[in-house]
Image (cartoon, rainbow, N blue to C red):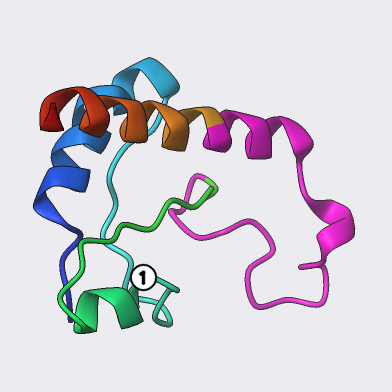
Amino acid sequence: VYGAGKQLMAAAQHEGPMHAARPIVWRGLPTDAAIPMARGFEAITVMATGPDDLPVAWNSEDDSPARVDVDVMVRSARFVEAILRRMDTTQA
């Protein structure tokens, strides 16, 4: 229903290749970004997916906090940090 914020998307596209991240169109359940976007704020969702562009073990009994891949979480955090740093330098 809503597209990711244009400035966030530009920063994510710029930083994506350096972090092995790429855009996908998510047509599953709404993410936490839906409410801010509905209220006019820029937002973007960052999620790890498998080869089929779905979260690993999504919608299954195997989907649990115990199965979180710490390496993927750290790489995701670094990607988000790079997006924010990029936006900070382009806003100055």
Q: Is residue 61 left or right of residue 83?
A: right
Q: Which residue ends up furthest to the top in the rendered image?
A: 18
- In the rendering, at what x and y percent does residue 42 appear? 20, 61
Find out whether residue 24 is within the magenta segment: no
Q: Is residue 76 left or right of residue 43?
A: right
Vertical order, 73 against 30 (above or below): above
> Residue at 63% of width from left, 69% of height from top?
58
- In the rendering, at what x and y percent does residue 78 appear? 52, 28
Amino acid type, callout 1: Ala
- Where is residue 91, by image quadrant? top left
Residue toward you, 39 or 63: 39
Vertical order, 91 against 52 (above or below): above
> Which type of secondary structure does the marked residue at label 1 adopt?
loop
Find out whether residue 63 is within the magenta segment: yes
Residue at mark 1:
33
Q: Badge 1 local density, few (<14 within 10 Å), some, or many (20+)?
A: some
Vertical order, 39 against 9 (above or below): below
Q: Is residue 69 left or right of residue 15?
A: right
Q: Which residues are magenta?
A: 51-77
- In the rendering, at what x and y percent does residue 11 appear? 21, 34
> Residue at 42% of width from left, 24% of height from top?
20
Residue toward you, 84 or 16: 84
Which part of the image, by quadrant, shows the C terminus?
Answer: top left
Vertical order, 1 against 19 (above or below): below
> Residue at 82% of width from left, 77% of height from top?
61
How many marks can you see?
1
Which part of the image, by quadrant, shows the N terminus?
Answer: bottom left
> Residue at 21% of width from left, 46% of height from top?
8
Q: Which residue ends up furthest to the front in the rendered image?
A: 92
Q: Is residue 21 left or right of residue 39?
A: right
